[in-house]
Image (cartoon, helix red, strand yellow):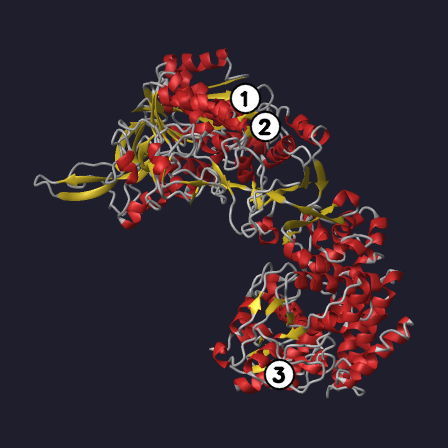
Amino acid sequence: MARIGVFICHCGENISATVDVVKVVAEAARIPGVAHSVEYKYMCSDPGQQLVKNAIKEKNLTGVVVAACSPRMHEPTFRRACAEAGLNPFLCEMANIREHCSWVHEKGEATTQKALDIVRTLVAKVKKNKALEPIKVPVTKTALVLGGGIAGIQAALDIANSGHKVILVEKAPSIGGHMSQLSETFPTLDCSQCILTPRMVEVAQHANITLYSYSELESLDGFIGNFKARIRRKARGLDEKLCTGCGLCMQKCPTRKIPSEFDAGLGLRPAIYVPFPQAVPNKPVIDREHCTYYRTGKCRLCEKVCPTQAIRFGQEDEIVEAEVGAVVVATGFDIKHGDFFPEYGYGKHQDVIDGLQFERLASASGPTLGEIRRPSDGKVPETVVFIACAGSRDPAKGIEYCSKICCMYTAKHAMLYRHKVHHGKPYVFYMDIRAGGKMYEEFVRRAMEEDGVQYVRGRVSRVYERNGRLVVKGVDTLLGARPLEIEADLVVLATAGVANAGAEELAQKLHVSYDAHKFYAEAHPKLRPVETNTAGIFLAGACQAPKDIPESVAQASGAAAKVGALFSQSELVREPLIAVVDRQAPPVYSSCVGCFLCQSACPYQAIEKEEFRGRDGQVVKTVAKVNPGLCQGCGTCVAFCRTKSIDIQGFSHAQVHAEVLALLERGERDG
Amino acid sequence: MSGEKHAHPAAEPLPGRVLEQTGVDVARCYQCGKCSAGCPLAAEMDYPPSQIMHLLQLAGEFPEFAEMALRSHTAWLCLTCEICYCRCPMELDIPRVMDALRHEALRQKKVNPKAKDILAFHRAFLDSVKHTGRLFEMGQVVDYKLRSGHFLQDLLQAPWMFLVGKLHLLPERVRDRRQLKRIFARTLKARENRP
Amino acid sequence: MKTGFYPGCSMKGSAREYSESLLAVARVLGRELPEVPDWNCCGATAAHNLDHDLALALPARILAAAEKKGMDEVLVPCAACYSRLKVTRHELLEDEKLRQRISGLVEADYRGSAKVVNIIEWLAAVPDLEKLVKKPFQRKVACYYGCLLVRPAGIVEFDRPEEPQSMDLLMAKLGAKPIDWAFKTECCGAGFSVSRTDLVAKLSGLILEDAVSRGAEAVIVACPMCHLNLDLRRPNIEKRTGKKYDIPVIYITQVLGLAMGLPPKKLGLQRHKVAVKFAPAESPVPGVSAKRGA
């Protein structure tokens, strides 16, 4: 026998100004099954909640309907109150007579009647509610951090320092990412490697961090708190325990003319190499694509000279399996390369380079040891033109967004050039200057005022080569849009920041959403920037969108905090408002026919297969089963199921049907 | 009043007419100047193409800017070489906009006096086509000289051209010349006679 | 495949040698090139400068006539006419109401079935062109595309607007050495040859300067307007720049004809303002000297 308690809130005047609350209370009391019907000015207040608790105890209520604001506001409040009074919290529902009624209608009879309809509907539902228990899921307190750039390093350190284990996976032979390629960083002009390498070493030495470099994620299964990762450790070609990092193999390797990835193609490296001197780990890798032995079967010189006999030519990739509770994706970004700017001769003329290549020229460990020299003839350029927005903010080139960091690094490049070539003339062609961070505007002003960088507002139409120099056809829009032609020795393009190659593939492995530009999607652009829509997978750094180092570090710490919060519990408690496939006794087992339409519809990969076997061990039936850890209760599967074998707890067929009938009841009565 | 794009109120003269005739929404231009940077004749223009676009952006609220755009020399100097359209990051069909400006300037009789010779040439050209259906170069040049007053221009070229067979004394005619005249009457002539 | 031929007005007059050389070459290739019946002027620059409807009607009349004659494609060797016809076809196929209105204006139901092709496309489609080369044109050449063969890219969809290669590849097949230069697609001054000769002198002067400074021995063109500006207006260019340029400007069909072994007179080389000095020795043409060594 149902004994429902109905509590109507005035919400100050928010509800009572347009709804006749007293009348609703009186009418609600007459609904069959309602044992208690009262009103109060502020139901969510302590006295208001106490009213609910007292009524539950005194009237032995089997269900509660609080007619007030939206459940998104106070459902947790009232469910907690019920729980405290001994009533299962899922036997409490809220009837929204504020956002759905009093706030959107004028005062009158019809408004009051609508409020009553809403109350009656929820009463009908609550009668069908079942007591539910929250779902508990265990948590493995190890984090997987993908990507060993500054964001990944920061996240790994923060998580490790809060006492949890971290597995850091980096696909390059060394951690450090793009930050290790930079010469100096804005706005401080700190030497990039000087501030980065201490962190890199900390990662390598931290007791809680296991570093897998030259490795990639092979697959990720499972769900929040319970992931199973398979990591492919690519074969370096040596026994890391024996290698001392002496570097003799690199010195002796006869194949030395391979374009260096670390030097952005401006320098060369041997086939067995460490990407840069401060690499962590400082152990080389054999590049099988270019190594003479792997291509022709001859050489093996490195093996002969290695003092500890550490070289292992036959080494194979190794798959490592790990159980982790959370994943932080910090795989970073790249800048756009290739022949996408034919009017600038990028890819055709050696002296038209991109920002990362300029960093390598400026870097003391770069191919020119920090001297700015033209790639074509090695001469010091007297005039350098920097072109901003080379690809970004350019729908014709397919990139409509702003890459955020280029205005700042272009100013930095121009300043570095002047610091190194005192008589040099730098020009920057820009559309706007975006310098919104702390000390950023001052930095750009310094470039213009103190370092003599000439800024010209306008875009460049074309760059072509003439007599060994580069003719830059630009314009100054602040001077009546007159064309301005400059003969430069070097042209540096601030090319767009884009997602890494392989970003899409990784996102699909992880089941995280990404946008049209393959940047990973945050759960909410304003309020949830470090979470994804996949529970347990967090984001940090430029894989989400182009950003600078301070922001990457901040995001990484943010993601680490989220991981910390997750790991602070030994069990995860989740709301049980999830889908359930019915189960019956054999031989039916379930009304599910095993079509698995639900599985293909589920956006969260929460549907699994369950096999039922007969006594002879043969599979009798394969039916769907919902993974309670992954299901988000969206209800898509319910809509697809042809046999209606799957139902959402808390929003079951019976409950919703009862609501609809309750609404129709008034219609029948009034004609 | 259609309000699908918030660019320009349809009632306003110039920008609305440009949008209607060309489909180009000048609000998308972010004044980068790349068109002016690549335009072969930008240095000779009073308002290089990016400035024309900006004049059009404001022309709805500021009629004096509409005037400046219509009376510009730029509209007539434009070679329709299509480089601006090719390089524009917003893929704006600037040559089409120039065409529309020319048509408007003619309609409102606001052609820049410096473009006198250019316009004379176009008119002479179309006159020739209207009468014979094909360009009669000799006739067109005579017509142009009468309009422009440059009687001595290219006088020395003519004998040589005639000698090498490049200049004919008689026009080639299309058979259905009446149809050509009808086409002209329904298009160019009709527009010119409109108030 | 029935191919029609739209010469355009200048090919009958000031660009006569282009037509001559094209027809001579077509004869060798065994290709018929019937002219579009009773074709009219396409309107060139003047029409679209003064009136949008007229600018569409004139080309539409031509293409409708070609369709009526059952032509699948129309070869338009003049790049300016090519542009007008191509743009008209594109606009009318995109906008049904416009197509109906213009069809009414030209008193023919224009459907857009006839394709519009340029000279380079047409020549590139000739199978085994290299086999017809008897006298390889062993010169360093600057292939000048001009504006309208490759732009607007979205409409012509031919080659690529920056650093096009189609003419260069064709020239290489004929034995020539195409050079890499910076003014392949920079405007020559277009329709200002008479009304603003000063501007033509400036723009065409820049083109010649770049070609010559990079060692080109000839500029190859595929447009009568470009030829006019670079060749006929040479005295104006020289006057403005104060420099003498004797680099010849040759139509692509003339180069093909020479490579095929046709006599220069058949290709109209004697009609150029700037003498083409390296035609084969057996030609008794004024201003043409004996063939130089390679």
Question: Does residue C68 sit above or below A501 in this rendering?
Answer: below
- The answer to which quarter of the image holds residue C60 is bottom right
Q: Residue furthest left?
A: A616
Asked whether, in this view, residue A414 is left or right of residue A647, the answer is right
- The answer to which quarter of the image holds residue A342 is bottom right
- Secondary structure category for the residue under label 3: loop
Taking depth in this image into account, of A525 and A477 the one nearest to the observer is: A477
> Residue beneath label 2, please?
A186
> Residue beneath label 1, please?
A22
Residue B152 in sight here: yes
Residue C246 point in image, percent of width and height: 72, 70
Taking depth in this image into account, of B184 and A216 the one nearest to the observer is: A216
User: How many numbered marks, from 0 up?
Assistant: 3
Asked whether, in this view, residue B29 is left or right of residue A505, the answer is right
Tag shown at residue C281? 3
Amino acid at pointer 3: Ala
Asked whether, in this view, residue B63 is left or right of residue C244, the answer is right
Residue C143 point in image, percent of width and height: 61, 67
Amino acid at pointer 1: Val
Amino acid at pointer 2: Phe
Marks 2 and 3, Cα distance to the nearest angstrom?
69 Å
Question: Does residue A379 sit above or below C16 in this rendering?
Answer: above
Marks 1 and 2, Cα distance to the nearest angstrom?
66 Å
